[in-house]
Image (cartoon, grey):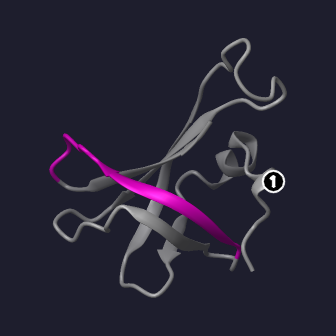
Amino acid sequence: MTADFVALTADAFAPHVGTSFRVEGGRHVLSLSEVERFENQPGHGDPAFRPFTLIFSGPPGDVLAEGMHTIIREDGTAYDLYLIPVHTPAPGRQDYQAVFN
């Protein structure tokens, strides 16, 4: 069962930086490498919600396609996230982002 969308906050993910997530139905394993927080723009959306981006890192070369993926944390907690492969300057990995705004 996947986590409720309302529970998806930067604070909920921050303790899991460095944790591995397995992509359901595939061979990819991604590590949560960063949680980026942003200020909410006045007049846009719920003022109680603070936008954030998750950055995951995986091996280079075998790029996971952009789209909805269920990722499963080591403890079995699953999340349905839209993952986007992004330009990664470091040669030893491929980064992905999930944006919450």
Pick the front one: 16 or 46: 46
Left or right of residue 52, residue 27 in this image: left
- The residue lying at 56 percent from left, 61 percent from top is 81
The residue labelled by disc 1 is 7
Range of the magenta residues?
77-91
Above or below for 68 versus 24? above
- The residue lying at 67 percent from left, 50 percent from top is 13
**Count of residue discs:** 1
Q: Quadrant of the C terminus?
A: top right
Q: Position of residue 32 (x, y in %)?
A: 50, 55
Q: Position of residue 17 (x, y in %)?
A: 57, 51
Q: Give the quadrant of residue 39.
A: top right
Q: Is residue 14 magenta?
A: no
Mark 1 is on which residue type?
Answer: Ala
Q: Is residue 80 magenta?
A: yes
Q: What secondary structure predominates along the stretch shown in magenta?
A: strand
Q: Position of residue 74 (x, y in %)?
A: 61, 75
Q: Give the quadrant of residue 88.
A: top left
- The residue lying at 27 percent from left, 56 percent from top is 94
Left or right of residue 81, residue 77 in this image: right
Above or below for 37 versus 94? above
Residue farthest bottom in this picture: 25
- Sort mark 1 into few (<14), some (14-19) or many (20+) by Cα contacts within 10 Å: few
Question: SS at mark 1?
Answer: helix
Left or right of residue 26, residue 19 in this image: right
Q: Position of residue 27 (x, y in %)?
A: 36, 84
Q: Quadrant of the N terminus?
A: bottom right
